[in-house]
């Protein structure tokens, strides 16, 4: 069992979880107001806002909401919320942690494990003592709290909820003493598998030169200011923290099959990096030759990443959160699923082909044939320049977007588009609504689509045609 942050990868399961509680008439503790949200994406945005002190609603404290996932079948079985601090109401009644288990998954011991995992998160946040409450008639929850070290303090009446609550304090014990981390500084490594299988190791200001796979099958690494000059440096590794390092051109295929790796303040010349990784974080990273990079990865976070000359960037990857990406390279994100992009500039032909569940906010996208064969593609406050863009898409949404030099748009797409600029031309949308202040050419071919299935909301249409120019000749 594991706790994960809410993402669109679990959108359907989140709504099924909500429906199960509503049908059972059960309380939804630790769910971050999920009861009010019929749209998982909107709920996910809400819980993310609640986590950040800068965006948490007034009169609330920052909190983190987690999904509890049964690992053997990736099934959502519970939810848990941790309040980072206590206000007066929380101190008197609700405490630091709220949680719930799906009605169909109760009496299986999940709540006990969930609370234990939640306490580990509290420890990581720096909390040493947490308050947890339950109703006096909830014997299962009481046992869960007691099993995790809860000490009873008092029973109080919460008048706003008309409920009595038992209050328990749990003291979070420190982790057992971790193995002492070895340190290698200003070393020079050559030869194959120079540090094969090492663990609890810190390497500083060192050079990995000719010799393949120097850190293969290592775990619990800290890498600071190192130079990777040869192939396959990090394969089959776990728990790697990298800062200030450089991958030179021959360090190609550098990070494959590696879980839980964070790379910060790095320059990467080498192509074909980051394949089949799970739990990849890239912050302030510059790629100078990222051909075929970030392929088939899962649970990826990027912030302030630059990638130039990047064909097929992020192909077939899943569960991506990207903020501040500068990308120059064609065929990006082909086959990606469950992705959110913010505040980015994307110069890329054939972007988002064959994707599912992608939302892009506040970004600039330039490149022809944008989004073909995608499902559930949403663009919000974006500027787009694309010849024959947004075609062959199932469920395209555009909210307050601008289209610059974009012609023959929306062909065979099901679309709900709110465009804030003139559209040069529209060709054969399948269905939906297109709203714009002006359209240059509106082309609707009755032989190929039913024009009545698309509503055009536009005050100024320069020309309307029953066929495109190449069929009128």
Image (cartoon, helix red, strand yellow):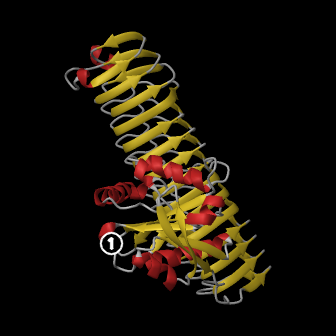
Q: Is residue 240 left or right of residue 102?
A: right
Rendered position, 362 above or below 96: above
Number of numbered discs: 1
Vertically, is 263 above or below 388? Answer: below
Residue lying furthest right in this view? Answer: 186
* Image position, residue 36 (x, y; %): 42, 48
Q: Nearer the viewer, residue 60 or 291?
A: 60
| Residue count near mark 1 (Cα–Cα under 10 Å), binned few <14, some 14–19, many ≥20 | few
Q: Nearer the viewer, residue 140 or 430?
A: 140
Task: Identify the residue at image location x=28%, y=18%.
Answer: 471
Residue at x-position 49% and y-position 70%? 3
Q: Which residue is drawn at 49% across and 19% down?
A: 422
Image quadrant occupied by the C terminus: top left
Decide if residue 346 is in sight here.
yes
**Would you identify the image quadrant in which residue 182 lies?**
bottom right
Q: Position of residue 342 (x, y in %)?
A: 57, 45
The residue labelled by disc 1 is: 105
Can you give x and y, in whole percent of width and height, for residue 431 in the image? 29, 29
Picture coordinates of residue 184, whole percent (x, y)? 76, 84
What residue is rendered at 64% in x and 85% in y? 175
């Amino acid at each position: 069992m594991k706790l994960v942050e809410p993402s669109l990868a679990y959108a359907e399961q989140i709504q099924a979880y909500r429906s199960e509680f509503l049908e059972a008439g059960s309380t939804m503790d630790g769910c971050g107001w999920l009861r009010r949200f019929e749209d998982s994406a909107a709920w996910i945005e809400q819980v993310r806002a609640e986590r950040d002190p800068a965006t948490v609603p007034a009169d609330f404290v920052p909190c983190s909401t987690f999904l509890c996932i049964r690992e053997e079948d990736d099934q959502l079985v519970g939810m848990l919320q941790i309040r980072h601090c206590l206000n007066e109401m929380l101190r008197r009644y609700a405490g630091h942690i709220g949680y719930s288990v799906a009605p169909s998954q109760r009496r299986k011991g999940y709540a006990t494990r969930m609370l234990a995992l939640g306490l580990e998160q509290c420890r990581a946040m720096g909390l040493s003592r947490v308050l947890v409450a339950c109703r006096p008639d909830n014997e299962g929850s009481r046992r869960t709290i007691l099993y995790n070290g809860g000490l009873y303090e008092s029973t109080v009446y919460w008048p706003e909820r008309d409920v009595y609550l038992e209050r328990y304090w749990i003291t979070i014990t420190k982790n057992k003493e971790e193995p002492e981390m070895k340190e290698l500084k200003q070393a020079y490594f050559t030869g194959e598998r120079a540090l094969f299988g090492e663990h609890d190791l810190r390497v500083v200001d060192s050079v990995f030169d000719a010799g393949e796979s120097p850190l293969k099958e290592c775990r619990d690494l800290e890498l600071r200011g190192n130079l990777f000059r040869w192939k396959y440096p990090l394969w089959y590794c776990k728990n790697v923290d990298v800062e200030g390092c450089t991958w030179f051109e021959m360090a190609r295929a550098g990070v494959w099959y590696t879980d839980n790796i964070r790379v910060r303040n790095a320059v990467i010349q080498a192509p074909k990096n980051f394949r089949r990784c799970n739990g990849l974080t890239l912050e302030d990273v510059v790629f100078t030759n990222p051909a075929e990079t970030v392929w088939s990865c899962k649970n990826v976070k990027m912030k302030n990443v630059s990638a130039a000359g990047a064909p097929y960037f992020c192909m077939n990857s899943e569960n991506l959160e990207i903020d501040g990406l500068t990308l120059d390279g064609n065929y990006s994100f082909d086959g990606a699923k469950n992705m959110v992009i913010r505040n980015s500039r994307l110069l890329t032909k054939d972007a988002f082909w064959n994707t599912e569940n992608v939302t892009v906010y506040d970004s600039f996208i330039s490149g022809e044939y944008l989004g073909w064969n995608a499902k559930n593609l949403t663009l919000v406050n974006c500027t787009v320049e694309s010849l024959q863009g947004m075609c062959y898409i199932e469920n395209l949404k555009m909210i307050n977007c601008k289209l610059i030099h974009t012609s023959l748009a929306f062909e065979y797409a099901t679309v709900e588009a709110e465009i804030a600029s003139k559209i040069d031309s529209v060709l054969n949308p399948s269905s939906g609504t297109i709203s714009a202040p002006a359209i240059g050419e509106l082309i609707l071919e009755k032989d190929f689509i039913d024009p009545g299935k698309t509503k055009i909301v536009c005050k100024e249409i320069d020309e309307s045609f029953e066929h495109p120019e190449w069929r009128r000749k």
